[in-house]
Image (cartoon, helix red, strand yellow):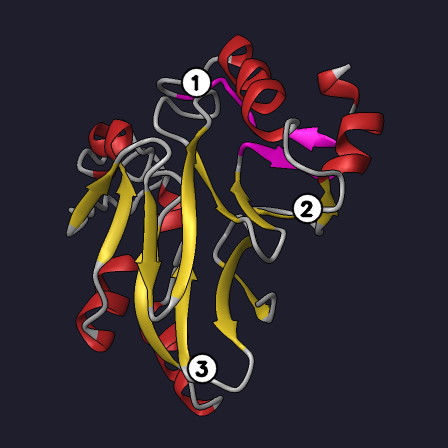
Amino acid sequence: MADLKVGRLMLGICQTNCYFVYREGEKDVIFFDPADKGEYIYEALQEKGFRVAGILLTHGHFDHIWGTNKLRELSGAPIYAYEAEKALCEDAVTNVSEQVGRAYTVIPDRYLKDNEEITIAGMTCKLLATPGHTVGSCCYYFEEDGILISGDTLFQDSVGRTDLATGSMGALVRSVKERLFVLPDKVRVYPGHGEMTDIGHERKYNPFLA
């Protein structure tokens, strides 16, 4: 039953896309990458009648986690991340938050494995490990609805930077080609920065992945 909707808030100094996925007509949302201002996120969703049922992280860089702890505190929702991203989530130097003047760490309630499916409020997605931007970068795939939350792995006509701790361009290119470009053309890609795209467009036109 393909009836999931995707909302977006753009927050923080890096204009990070924060997505919330929900089933049409229902109140629970899965929130992805609370970039900053967890209290604002909580209140903005409340005003729309939504409640946060789970918080999923695509990776641990500061501009994707600064709002996590406050949003968890206010909503009571657990935080999930890929197990390979433990070092970035829990270390302020590795996740670059200390270098930009606001040291921050988050300890997720649960670390997930590659290909693990997680169901929150009746909505199921699969974690796809896509190392490259960071060693523990991942994407979340809602197969039935053709939705991919891609974090900083894949952008519209671009890819994530790989010059920070644990990054690797070789790994990123392999991840996209082997994990994402095998998905159907019509899968909608919701990236951590910039505008939405789809797998078919990126497979054909992305200059970094030719």
Q: Which residue is mark 1?
A: 167
What residue is shown at x 60% (from left), y 46% (from top)? 193
What residue is shown at x 49% (from left), y 72% (from top)? 22
Q: Which residue is mark 2?
A: 187
- The three-letter amino acid code for the residue at tag 2 is Val
Q: Is 159 contained in the magenta span?
A: yes
> In the displayed structure, would residue 87 be above or below residue 49?
above
Where's residue 75, x and y in %?
A: 24, 76
Query: In the picture, residue 170 is in which quadrant?
Result: top right
Q: Which mark is residue 44?
A: 3
- Our reading of the magenta stretch's main secondary structure is loop
Give the number of the mark in front: 3 or 2.
Answer: 2
> How crowded is the residue under tag 1: few (<14 C-alpha within 10 Å), some, or many (20+)?
some
In this orientation, which residue lies closer to the viewer: 38 or 141? 141
Where's residue 11, x and y in %?
A: 50, 61
What residue is shown at x 17% (from left), y 70% (from top)? 73
The outermost residue toward the front is 1
Q: Earlier in the sequence, mark 2 or mark 1?
A: 1
- The three-letter amino acid code for the residue at tag 3 is Ala
Report the span colored magenta: 153-164
Looking at the rendered structure, the secondary structure element under dot 3 is helix
